[in-house]
Amino acid sequence: MTSPAKFRKEKEIVAEYDTQVKEIRAQLVEQLKCLDQQCELRVQLLQDLQDFFRKKAEIEVDYSRNLEKLAERFLTKTRSTKDHLLKKEHSILSPVNCWNLLLLQVKRESRDHATLSDLYLNNIIPRFAQISEDSGRLFKKSKEVGVQLQEDLMKVLNELYTVMKTYHMYNTDSMNAESKLKDAEKQEEKQMGRSDRQTPRSPDTLSSIKTDEKPVRRSSVKKIEKMKEKRQAKYTENKLKAIKARNEYLLALEATNSCVFKYYIHDLSDIIDCCDLGYHASLHRAMRTYLSAEQNVETSKHSGMETLEGAAESLEANGDKQKLMETYNNVFCPPARFDFQSHMGDTRGVVCAQQPLESELLQRCQQLQSRLSTLKIENEEVKKTMEATLSTIQDMVTVEDYDVSECFHHSNSMESVKSTFSESYLSKPSLAKRRANQQETEQFYFTKLKEFLEGRSLITKLEAKHDLIDKTMGESQKSDCCLASGRRNSALRKQESGEVIPLMVESCIRFISRHGLQHEGIFRVSGSQVEVNDIKNAFERGEDPLAGDQNDHDMDSIAGVLKLYFRGLDHALFPKEVFHDIISCVSMESLQERAIHVKKVLKSLPNKTLIIMRYLFAFLNHLSQYSDENMMDPYNLAICFGPTLMSVPEGNDQVSCQAHVNELIKTIIIHHDTIFPGPQEVQGAIYIVPGAGDDFCDSPHCEPPLVEEPAPETVSVSRNSEDVMALTV
């Protein structure tokens, strides 16, 4: 029998084995549960994808229908328009073209989104349903294979348990046989020892004892030896069986470990692969189908956007004006000329230039010629002011504030997106001010436009009358008609040739400095044309109508005479030769650097020109110091005098160059004391602020004492006047 200690040990071994097998069995059960869970999640995911795309398809259909309704609503309205001529492709106006392309783009988006919905319902959703069906079927088969592998693994474990029990049994028998063999050996040794320890006796006694005990001892020894031999044979047999059982156990143990390792490392991976067979590839195809659909929608939209962008870039006013006039040629073409309608037999349809009407017509021709010269100069000045104002308006309406990229830089938090375009543009406090400035500028532009158109109409009428009289009078009368005008212009040319300040310039500036520094809108508001002509004619006769301290003249008319003088010069005060050199300073940000550059360029001009410039800009600087009252800061004065003092050479963009000219004139007004040389460098008249001395200026016309250099503070302006407001704002 086995000892209790050995029995407990064997029982513990079996219990440990059973525990390990139970853990493996529990793992196998959890593995199947895990695969079941993955299959359920996969099926749920595919079902969610189907529901998602089904709902998205509904949204796309609704969106497509709404776009279709929106497009049809306005297309129907466009088809019913009465202006059928404007529907022709060759005569369509660019804004209408943009509008039509926008509606066509909406219809295209409607069709694209309807196609997208159809793809969702009939292509992508069936793909997901097929994937779900395939995944379930493959999982079922994979699970069957997995269950079979688990059963085979459990068979191997059971076989190991059987081999282990056999090994334990044979080993126990071997140990028992060994124990019995040892007992037999101990009995033999004990028997042999007992014979040797008996007490010695006499030879006769001993002889008689040996004779009596010899048969008994031999029988006992033989019996023990026979038992020993039997037990030895039994031990040898059991020992051999135990060794064989142990070998079988070790072989089974190695095979079992290999099977367990194979199952966990290879078989499970293969089972999972079987469950995933084709799943990811099919899902990839479905998602690629979705991406292809969306990308094609984006491509189609991008193509339409490019067409629409081209139409937006083709918005052009002059081309539309030409198309409109060509389309409605019968409406815009000039009517037939009015013919002379004879009355009561009077058939003479020409102007009669015979005496006594000849002298009257000659005088009228001279008056018309003089009037036309004045009107053309004035109208040209109004035109340039109008063009400068138009440039300002164009700058306002062409500001590039249409990029809304920042509104689409959403954060990754997936919070509700709120457009910031309205906050960044429409909610700015300066919007109302910008709108007010634009409206005020537009009002000023239309005022100048109306003045220009009225002046051009008057010039057209007077030119027609003058040309007809001139044609009637003949070439000789034409020469006589222009003689008086030549005499008047000679006075101006004579004044220009001298190095003193012309009387007209000096007298007008003196009058304005004494009486008009606070006059609101000086040089901006047009004066009385009759008074301008009267003052100008008086100066041409050599008179000074502004002499004395009387203040009975219209200030705007006197300002108009001063501008008219510089407008009527044969060559502008700033020669065209220095235009590009001097205008390049506008790119400099610092006004001081501009002034230094302008000074270098103007050094090449004649002294008489520099003297007039120095005198004029010193006056304009003084006038700008009263901008709070007269509303004429340096930039506003520059807008009025820019077109007069510096003409833009041909071949240059008149609008953009005029804006640069105005900026240059503003710089010269502000920094005139830095730009122009003092009386020590270039001797000549200088402008002195009224009240700074006993006399007004150093000029032969006003006979002052000695020429004095003005104090710097009397002719300078604050350097902080850079931030001046434009005339049209």
Image (cartoon, rainbow, N blue to C red):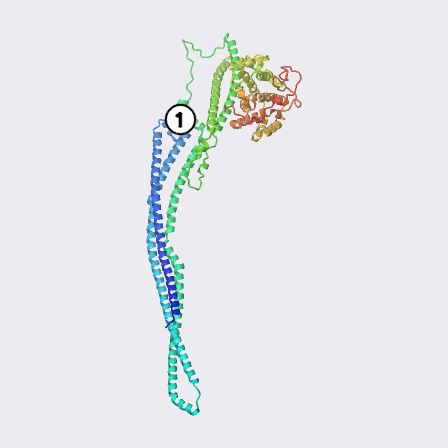
Which residue occupies the extreme top position in the image? 356
What kind of element bears circle 1? helix
What x and y, as percent, mark residue 58?
33, 40
Q: Is residue 97 left or right of residue 521?
A: left
On the rendered structure, is 716 left or right of 183? Answer: right
Residue 587 seen in render: yes
Q: Is residue 75 above or below residue 679?
A: below
Q: Is residue 123 above or below residue 170?
A: above
Foreground residue among 456 and 246: 246
Please provide percent x and percent y for residue 183. 40, 77
Of residues 643 and 719, the one nearer the viewer is 719
Residue 350, position in %: x, y? 46, 12
Quadrant in the rendering for residue 662 = top right
The residue at the far bottom in this view is 204
| Mark 1, other Cα within 10 Å: few <14 / some 14–19 / many ≥20 | some
Q: Which quarter of the figure is the N terminus placed in?
A: bottom left
Picture residue at 42% right of the left edge, 9% below the top: 346
Number of disc labels: 1
Question: In this rendering, does residue 575 appear at all?
Answer: no
Q: Residue at x 39, y 40 (%)?
A: 297
Location of residue 25 in the rendering, given as x and y in whole percent from the top left corner:
36, 60
Residue 649 is left or right of residue 62, and the answer is right
Identity of the amino acid at label 1? Thr
Q: Based on the displayed image, in which of its 4 quarters is residue 669 positioned? A: top right
Choose between 156 and 356: the one closer to the eye.
156
Q: Which residue is mark 1?
A: 327
